[in-house]
Image (tube, rainbow, N blue to C red):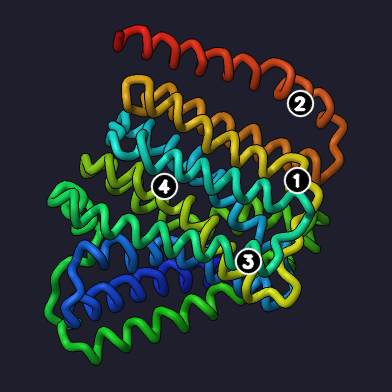
Amino acid sequence: MSLVFFVLGLIALVAGASMLVRGAAKLAVSFGISPLVVGLTVVAFGTSAPETAVSVGAVLQGKSDIAVGNVVGSNIFNVLFVLGASALIAPLVIHRQLVRQEVPIMIGASVILCVMALDGRIGHFDAALLAALFVAYTVFLIAQSRRAGTEIDDAALAELPAASRWDRHWSVQVLLVIVGLVMLVIGAKWLVDAAVEFARALGVSDLVIGLTIVAAGTSLPEVATSIVATIRGERDIAVGNVVGSNTFNILACLGISGLVAPGGLAVAAPLLSLDLWVMLAAAVACFPIFVTGREIARWEGLLFLLYYAAYVMFLILAATHHAALQGFSDTLFEYVLPLTVIVLVVSLLHSNAAKR
C-alpha cells in the first residue's frame, strides 16, 4: 500500500502543479497581468510547487529531515541528472545571461544555505532572510525583463499553458487553482507518509529517502520540462528551468518551510558532512562547464549522470553499512573527484586562452 500511495502522491503532485500553473497563469492574464510577469512568477512557482508542498507537509508532520533532504536532493538531482540526461539528447547551448547572472545567483544561494546550516539549524530569522531574498530576486527579474524586451519575454511565454476555450472563464480558472492546491496538499501527505514507511521497511533514515526517492519524485516537473524543451530545440528553457528551480528551492521552499516549522528546520549531521557540499559542488561545477564553449556537451552530460549514480551508490552503501563503502569512498574522493577538478580547470584555462 505504501508503494500505491507513493505513486498516487506523485501523480497528484504533478497533476496539481499543472492545474495550479494553468489556472493561476490564465487568471492573472484575465486580470490584466502581463504574460511576462506570469511566466517569471506563477510558472516558476508551479514547477517547484511539489518540492514546496512536500517540504511544508513534512515539516507539519515533524519530519524536518525529509523537508531539508528533499530540497538538497532535488537540487543535486536537477543539475546532475536532469541536465545530464538533457545534454545526452542534444548538446545544451547556454544563454549569456545564465553564465553572467543566473548561475552565480544559484551558487550564491547555495553558499548562503551552507553557511546558515553550519550551526545545525535553519532558524526563523534564516528562513525569513531566504524568503526575503526570494521576493527581492523575483522583483529584480521582473524589472530586468521589462527593460530587456522581447528575448526573455519569448522564453517566459513559451512556458505558459496553451490557449484553449474550456478554461477561459475566471470561475473555471479559480476552480483550477483551488483543485490544484488541494491535490498538492493531498499528494504531499501521501508521498511523505509513504516515504516514511519506505524508510522503516528498508531500515534507512528519513534523510536518505528524502535525498533520493522523494527528491527525484518531486523533480518530475523539471525532468519533463527540460527534456521536452531539449527535444523541441528550446535549450535555453531546458537549462534555465533547472537553474531557476534550484534558486527557487533554496530561497522560497526552505524559506517557507522554515517559517512554518515551530522551531525552525533542524539540519542533520550527514547533510553537513556530505550532501550540502555535493549540492554546492554541483552548482559550482556548472560555471566552468557553462563558460567553456557556452554549452553542455554530451560527454559533460554523461559525466553529470555518472556522478549522480556514484552519489546515489554512496548513499546506499552508507545507509546499509556495506563493506565496500570504504573502498568506494577512497576511489571517489582520492582519485575521481580530483581528476575531474583538474579537467574542469584545464578546460576553463584553455577556453580563456582561446578567447584571447
* Circle 4 residues within 10 Å: few <14, some 14–19, many ≥20: many
Count neighbours of disc 3 (C-alpha within 10 A) and say few if under 14, some if 14 to 19, many if 20 or more: few
Q: Earlier in the sequence, mark 3 or mark 4?
A: 3
Is the residue under label 4 in contact with that under label 2 (CB below 8 Å)? no
- Seen from the viewer's position, the closer of residues 60 and 350 is 350
Q: Residue 3 shows which numbered tag?
A: 3
The residues bearing labels 2 and 1 have C-alpha atoms spaced at a distance of 20 Å
Position of the C terminus by quadrant: top left
Q: Is residue 66 above or below residue 79?
A: below
Q: Is residue 198 visible?
A: no
Sequence-wise, the earlier of marks 2 and 1 is 1
Closer to the N terminus: mark 2 or mark 4? 4
Q: Is residue 294 left or right of residue 195?
A: left
| Structural distance between the alpha carbons of marks 3 and 4 | 28 Å
Q: Amino acid at mark 2?
A: Phe
| Position of residue 106 measured from the top left corner of the image (x, y, whole percent) | 48, 45
On screen, 26 above or below 68?
below
Q: Earlier in the sequence, mark 1 or mark 3?
A: 3
Specify the label residue 69 is tagged with: none
Q: Nearer the viewer, mark 2 or mark 1?
A: 1
State which quarter of the image contains the N terminus. bottom right
Residue found at the very far bottom of the displayed protein: 171
Find disc 2 in the rendering and name its residue.
Answer: 328
Q: Position of residue 353 (x, y in %)?
A: 36, 7
Q: Secondary structure at mark 3?
A: helix
Instruction: Give the foreground label among 3 and 2.
Output: 2
